[in-house]
């Protein structure tokens, strides 16, 4: 049962980011897709709510960072934001909150 939950979590979260990577080329890296699959497997074993919370928290955490970066002069405003650390941070917080 635990293996099935991990597999479904990996397919769910990894598949979501795979769709983003395929539909918006260059906007999200393939490393983020692989990381999302691994984190989805980990969060899937905890709870489905932890999976959704980890997904949402990644965007909540990256928003202030991206907003500050956009307020910089034009040379830095077009800089890419590394999403992996925020994806991992969201998953860690979700695991703690969900009690895993």
Image (spheres, helix red, strand yellow):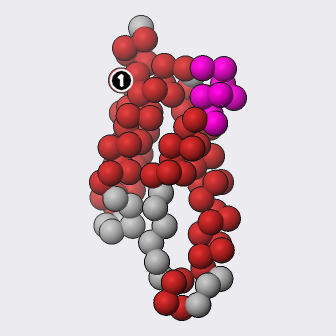
**Prevailing SS of the magenta stretch:** helix
Circle 1 crowding by C-alpha within 10 Å: few under 14, some 14–19, many from 20: some
Residue at 54% across / 91% down in the picture? 74
Quarter the C terminus occupies: top right
Q: Position of residue 39 (x, y in %)?
A: 44, 35
What residue is rendered at 55% in x and 37% in y? 91
Viewer-proximal residue, 27 or 22? 27
Asked if 2 appears above or below 7 in the picture, the reply is above
Vertical placement of 60 versus 99: above or below? below
**Residue 21 inside the magenta-drawn segment:** no
Is 77 located above or below residue 87 in the figure?
below
Residue 45 located left or right of residue 15: right
The residue to which callout 1 is attached is 7
Q: Quadrant of residue 50?
A: top right
Residue 45 appears anywhere in the view: yes
Specify whether residue 94 is painted magenta. Answer: yes
Query: Count of labels shown?
Result: 1
Q: Which residues are magenta?
A: 93-100
Measuring from the top left, give residue 65's x and y in whole percent. 62, 66
Quadrant hosting residue 36:
top left
């Amino acid at each position: 049962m635990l293996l099935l939950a991990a597999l479904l979590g990996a397919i769910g979260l990894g598949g979501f980011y795979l769709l983003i990577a395929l539909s918006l080329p260059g906007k999200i890296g393939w490393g983020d897709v692989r990381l999302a699959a691994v984190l989805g497997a980990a969060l899937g074993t905890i709870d489905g709510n932890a999976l959704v919370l980890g997904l949402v928290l990644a965007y909540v955490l990256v928003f202030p960072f991206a907003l500050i970066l956009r307020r910089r002069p034009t040379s830095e405003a077009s800089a890419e934001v590394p999403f992996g650390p925020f994806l991992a941070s969201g998953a860690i917080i979700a695991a703690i909150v969900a009690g895993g």
